Image (cartoon, grey):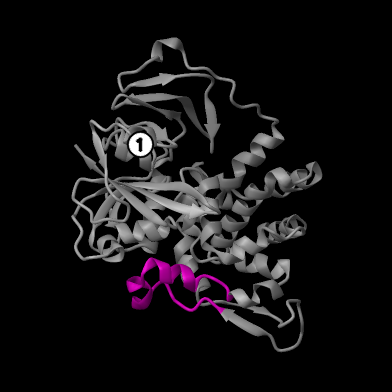
Amino acid sequence: MKRFFCIMTSIFVTSTMLLCSSFNCSANGSSSDEPAEEFVYSVDFTSNEWYDMPLEDKLSRCDFPSNKLSTLTTAQLLELAVDYPLGIDLFFGDTFEEGFELMVSHSNVFKVLLTRTDLNDLILPYYSNLVDTFDKNEDCVRKLMIDSLIRHQWETMSASEKNAVVNIHSLISEDIWSCILGHIVNDYSARFVQNNTYISSEKLPDTRGFIANGPCQIIDFTTYQPGTYLKYGKACSCLRFESGDFSNDEKDAIKNEISDAFPNWIFSTNPTKRFNCHSYIWISYDTYSNIYTLDDPTPFTTATSYFYEENINTALLCGQYVLIYEIYSGNHILKHSVKVNTSSTGSNMNSYMSSSYVQSKVGVAGVYVTTLADMFSFYSGSYYVPFTVL
């Protein structure tokens, strides 16, 4: 993975130019020599307006006018998608797949593009042309985005399409190689078989309350041991990190990209795949010893000797733990865990969130401090649940 940092270090420098670029499409959604309507990403990352803009406004500025999306061809949608200015979303999930889904949830262009049945037919020629004509100063964002699209579409591709990707990938020079796609291609071409390693019995259980079970899992080319974590008299399904974290160069690159994209966020610790947001809040703040990923910490929240569940969307007190939920298609989906650093002021949900600063582990990135409003918006929150630590 060490070679992909060159791509990430250029993402938001390149995005500054892309935000001022345009995409042309005819009114009926097909290519034409007639005068075309122009869509422009209207804010420059270097401007004070972007710096001071709330996250929700940044996201809305990166959407295509919804009444015109259906008029675009798949090729035009693909062009818009690879120029998406907030590609940093890819690094805000615990895996690249989660980061991609987060980006899709923020972008109406991606939502529509992924419904097009001819997408795979267009990805391959676009990818081939990009590799042939790659300009490191202009195309880093596009390379990152097309890699993520191919990764997402990989299981829907035929054997011949996968072989074509492998052949194109073999032409890539080292300075534009990407871990997002490179390892998938390498594993496919080598017919690599994963998930065949067991952790030796002397590691069970360890001093952190972890009990392993079953074979290791390789997720995003990082090895984890599945098991159960025992704490507060409760048990949660858990993964223990074994190997495959970011290199120092990769950590610096991700940190710099987030700093450029969200300058008001306060940096605390480096990016890592050793633990996730739920583990950081509900198992340990110790970023050195914490090597656990919790998918769902809610069993811990039922430990009434340790936590008291407050009303949803209520005022916040320093030291509380907070779960952020999204309601989607009638389902209540847990999105994020944070710890409250400053008590809230005001008299309603919005004022509580905007006045309260929280700390949390942000996807595969590091730990940051910002307002609950920022985290709530970023993770598409519908409501939050505070827990008072007893």
10 or 282: nearer the viewer: 282
Check the picture and name the quadrant holding the C terminus. top left
Direction front: furthest residue: 311
Q: Please indicate whether residue 165 sits to the left or right of residue 272 in the image.
A: right
The answer to which image quadrant residue 235 occupies is top left
**Is-magenta flag for residue 62?**
yes
> Residue visible at 46% across and 71% down?
16
Span of residues in magenta:
40-65
Q: Position of residue 254 (x, y in %)?
A: 41, 51
Q: Give the image location of residue 160, x and y in percent.
A: 81, 44
Residue sitting nearer the eye, 26 or 20: 26
- Residue type indicated by callout 1: Ser
Left or right position of 15 against 309: right
Q: Residue at x 76, y 76 (%)?
A: 30
Binning the other alpha carbons within 10 Å of mark 1 as few (below 14), some (14 to 19) or many (20 upward) gives many
Residue named by callout 1: 279
Q: Is residue 367 visible?
A: no
Residue at the extreme right of the image, as rendered:
160
Seen in the image, is 276 located left or right of residue 218?
left
* 309 in magenta: no
Q: Give the vertical position of 211 relative to 49 (above or below).
A: above
Secondary structure at numbered mark 1: helix
Quadrant of residue 182 in the image? top right
